Image (cartoon, rainbow, N blue to C red):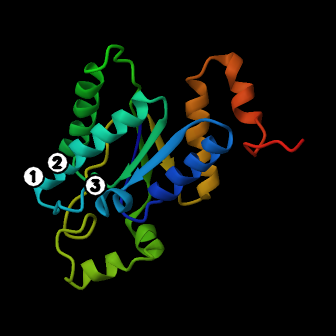
Amino acid sequence: MYVILGLSGAGKTSIAFELEAYLVSRGIPAYGLDGDNIRCGLNKDLSFSKKDREENIRRVAEVARLFADSGQICLCSFVSPFAEDRWVYQIGHDMLACKIQESDLPFFEVFVDTPLAVCEQRDNKGLYLKARQGIIKGFTGIDQPYETPEHPELVLKTVDCTVEQSAMQVLSFFASLLCPVYIADFFYWPHSLFVSK
């Protein structure tokens, strides 16, 4: 499981979905979970209260574990502004992983380190503007703090990188964990799942 963290507009979901497309196009099962696809369905009954935020993360950890347990790479892209919430991800993942016979599901934290000003420039939903106007209360980065992850496995600086370049940094990290025999195949598989006859 990869948990991709950062402010709204940092590029988390774009990177996660780029990774998903890259992996799937090479026959590697992967799925991206983000706030939009989780909050519109599974967690549409939850608010942004502390209790509901914890329940949101608990559910996400459970769904991600199910994906990972089935052999898929799960890419979770969420703001997760508080260290306590991220700890719930890790604890939740570890506790859930212990429920299966082989509890060797890997967990990696990727921090998308993008300055607030850049996130505001990228804001295509108008959330930062609404937060600055007081329409949205408790918005991370404006009137709610963002606690930077202390020990992520990977930090992405997206100011001078494209989404594709950022995704390749994650893929390079992922490849460094693979057995060397598989690395060449991982990066040089055909771009299409289907080969014409």
- Whether 197 is drawn above or below 77: the answer is above
Q: Are marks 3 and 2 in contact (CB under 8 Å)?
A: no
Placement of the N terminus among the 4 image quadrants: top left
Which residue lies most toward the top here? 101
**Few, some or many residues within 10 Å of mark 2 (<14, 14–19, 20+):** some
User: Which one is earlier in the sequence, the residue at label 1 or at label 3?
Assistant: 3
Q: Say which amino acid is labelled 2.
A: Glu
Q: Name the residue rendered at 39%, 18% in the picture.
A: 104
Kind of element beneath mark 3: loop
Q: Give the foreground label among 3 and 2.
A: 3
Q: Name the residue rendered at 63%, 51% in the picture.
A: 165
Q: Are marks 1 and 3 in contact (CB under 8 Å)?
A: no
- Whether 168 is drawn above or below 93: the answer is below
- Along the line of sight, the residue nearer the viewer: 104 or 176: 104
Residue of label 2? 55
**Which mark identifies residue 42?**
3
Q: CA distance from mark 3 to mark 2?
A: 11 Å
Q: Give the foreground label among 1 and 3.
A: 3
Q: Say which amino acid is labelled 1.
A: Lys
Query: Is 93 on the left or on the right of 134, as rendered?
Result: right
Q: Name the residue rendered at 58%, 52% in the picture.
A: 18
- Along the line of sight, the residue nearer the viewer: 55 or 11: 55
Which residue lies most toward the right here? 197
Q: CA distance from mark 1 to mark 3?
A: 16 Å
Kind of element beneath mark 1: helix
Q: Are marks 2 and 1 in contact (CB under 8 Å)?
A: yes
Tell me where residue 155 appears, x and y as whole percent. Answer: 46, 43
**Which mark identifies residue 51?**
1
